[in-house]
């Protein structure tokens, strides 16, 4: 049996990459990860702030952004430009040969416009497939992809796409080529029973105790789609999924999601 090369995929929330101190810490830790790696980032707070300066209203439903044409222009500028290129420049300064990408670049992620009978999401995308061949070509050349939360529909339209989903779908796409560890990192040390107690981190979540945690209200809000994406990745062949703090991306700390 041929041993697959290890690949670490880090998904980091906008709150971490939008503040200099936390971004510097993340980039230091990411640069120190050995072997093949991909970084996927958010940037929603920056988009909201810049939209407000431009007089463009931000409309959210369950934490997801309605993306009409003016908002699409804002998120493209912010995610694909400001946030992405700051990360790329910071990694180049740390000796990491990073390349900033949206899903349209090299056609790495194609999606379709979200269809809903009740909500017009506008230019919001749901991922169809990751282009594992192109990711593999980049990685084999020593390039580290830095993914902004934007995809495209193959018809000339960019689509605002949830970064957690991009991470899950990218991880699934390359799982047949690599031994993939997917790490969702944010400002907390993992999924906590008590949101005010860092010592209450739940070490392991499987399909059985996940149902209990949902019923008890321990897991709620934005953590639900994150864990759903984690299970989706595992079912797609990803070896390991962890939810942890941005300064603990060692593949050990945090909450391990298992089937």
Image (tube, grey):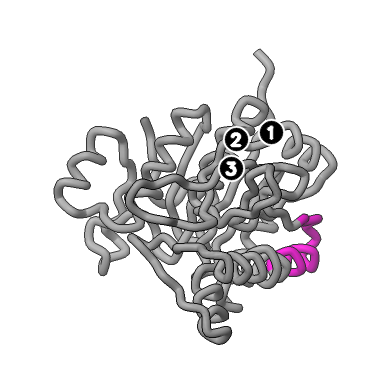
Disc 3 or 2, which lies upstream in sequence?
3
In the picture provided, is 254 more to the left or to the right than 224?
right
In the picture provided, is 30 more to the left or to the right than 45?
right
| Residue 181 in sight | no
Task: Determine whether 86 is above or below 50 in the image.
Answer: above
Residue tagged by mark 3?
111
Q: Residue at x 35, y 57 (%)?
A: 222
Q: How far across and how far down the image is residue 35, in percent? A: 71, 43
For the residues marked 2 and 1, what is the alpha-carbon distance in whole angstroms? 9 Å
Q: Quadrant of the C terminus?
A: top left
Q: Residue at x 69, y 31 (%)?
A: 5
Badge 2: residue crowd in 10 Å (few <14, some 14–19, many ≥20): some
Comparing labels 3 and 1, the label whose residue is closer to the camera: 3
| Residue 195 in sight | yes
Residue most toward the top? Answer: 1
Q: How far across and how far down the image is residue 55, in percent? A: 53, 84
Indicate the secondary structure of the residue bearing disc 2: strand
Q: How far across and how far down the image is residue 69, in percent? A: 57, 65
Indicate the secondary structure of the residue bearing disc 3: strand
CB-based contact (under 8 Å), mark 2 and mark 1:
no
Disc 3 or 1, which lies upstream in sequence?
3
Indicate the secondary structure of the residue bearing disc 1: helix
Task: Determine whether 138 is above or below 237 in the image.
Answer: below
Badge 1: residue crowd in 10 Å (few <14, some 14–19, many ≥20): some
Residue tagged by mark 1?
132
Q: Bounds of the magenta span?
A: 87-99
Q: Quadrant of the N terminus?
A: top right
The circle drawn on residue 129 is 2
| Nearest the eye: 76 or 230 | 76
| Nearest the eye: 121 or 22 | 121
């Amino acid at each position: 049996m041929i041993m697959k090369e290890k690949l670490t995929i880090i998904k980091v929330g906008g709150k971490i990459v939008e503040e200099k101190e936390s971004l510097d810490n993340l980039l230091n830790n990411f640069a120190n990860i050995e072997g093949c790696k991909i970084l996927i980032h958010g940037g929603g707070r920056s988009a909201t702030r810049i939209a407000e300066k431009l007089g463009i209203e931000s409309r959210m439903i369950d934490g997801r952004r309605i993306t009409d044409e003016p908002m699409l222009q804002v998120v493209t500028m912010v995610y694909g430009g400001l946030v992405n290129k700051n990360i790329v420049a910071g990694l180049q300064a740390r000796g990491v040969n990073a390349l900033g990408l949206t899903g349209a670049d090299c056609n790495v992620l194609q999606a379709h416009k979200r269809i809903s009978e009740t909500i017009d999401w506008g230019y919001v995308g749901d991922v169809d497939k990751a282009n594992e061949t192109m990711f593999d070509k980049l990685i084999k050349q020593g390039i580290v992809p830095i993914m902004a939360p934007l995809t495209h529909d193959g018809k000339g339209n960019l689509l605002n796409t949830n970064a957690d989903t991009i991470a899950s779908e990218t991880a699934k796409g390359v799982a047949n080529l690599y031994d993939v560890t997917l790490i969702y990192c944010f400002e907390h040390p993992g999924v906590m029973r008590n949101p005010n107690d860092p010592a209450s981190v739940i070490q392991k979540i499987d399909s059985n105790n996940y149902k209990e945690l949902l019923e008890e209200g321990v897991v709620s809000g934005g953590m639900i789609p994150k864990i759903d994406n984690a299970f989706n990745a595992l079912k797609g062949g990803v070896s390991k999924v962890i939810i942890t703090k941005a300064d603990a991306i060692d593949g050990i700390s945090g909450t391990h999601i298992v089937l």
